[in-house]
Image: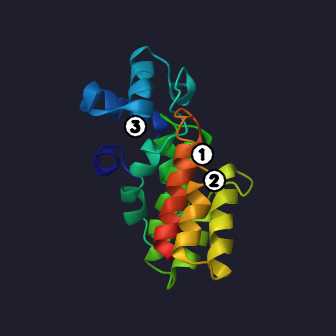
Amino acid sequence: GLAICRQYGPDFTPADVASFWLRNLPIFHVCTAERIAYRNLVMCVPPPESASFRNYYREWIGAQIRADFFGYVNPGRPARAAEFAWRDAAISHVKNGIYGEMWVAAMLAAAYVCDDVPTVIRAGLGQIPARCRLAERLRQVLELHASGAAYEQALAFVTDRWDENRGHDWCHTISNAEIVAVALLW
């Protein structure tokens, strides 16, 4: 993120991110959604199609892992952090894969100015679609916390819904975000 912003400035585009990747990242330094997106870019499949063309990992957590910088450079500006994250994620992810990066970036930006964890999580939620699967599940975790549930109950609530036999499912980003919320709240 830092290198992209240094090279292209704060108005970087998904095409700039794609160009940066092709010029600076060896293909074997990326995996899952990023590797397939990279392959698609090499085959001249531009963003945002690079994220979805034959990309089984398009809703995994790879983009979410790239969120930190975009939150750090936008202290107190969660909407701007989420927008930076969207531009980054759009080359390799779709739906909850993008929303996960937006949520984390927005939370990090909000953490500079918010006093409590539930408010930080809600600030992140405010930057993703209210009716997406990720938002619905995160609201359930917030409700569980507000009800006074114990940590063990919260962890069981999240892990009972995982299905490790569905490895190419959207559940990876959602379950990872739920675990992050549980870790932050309890």
Spot the residue most to the right.
Answer: 131
Q: Which mark is residue 96?
A: 1
Q: Amino acid at mark 3?
A: Val
Residue 37: x and y in percent read 44, 27
Task: Please tell me how crowded label 2 is: few (under 14), some (14-19), or many (20+) other residues with Cα within 10 Å.
Answer: many
Circle nearer the N terminus (2, 1) = 1
Q: Which residue is mark 2?
A: 134
Residue 109: x and y in percent read 46, 68
Residue drawn at 51 percent across, 81 percent down: 114
Residue drawn at 50 percent across, 24 percent down: 46
Disc 3 secondary structure class: helix
Q: CA distance from mark 2 to mark 1?
A: 6 Å
Residue drawn at 41 percent across, 57 percent down: 70
Front position in the image: 177 or 20: 177
Q: Which residue is mark 3?
A: 17
Disc 1 secondary structure class: helix
Q: Amino acid at mark 1?
A: Asn
Residue 5: x and y in percent read 34, 49
- The quarter holding residue 40 reads top left
In the rendered view, tell whether residue 141 sits above or below residue 35. below
Task: Please tell me how crowded label 3 is: few (under 14), some (14-19), or many (20+) other residues with Cα within 10 Å.
Answer: many
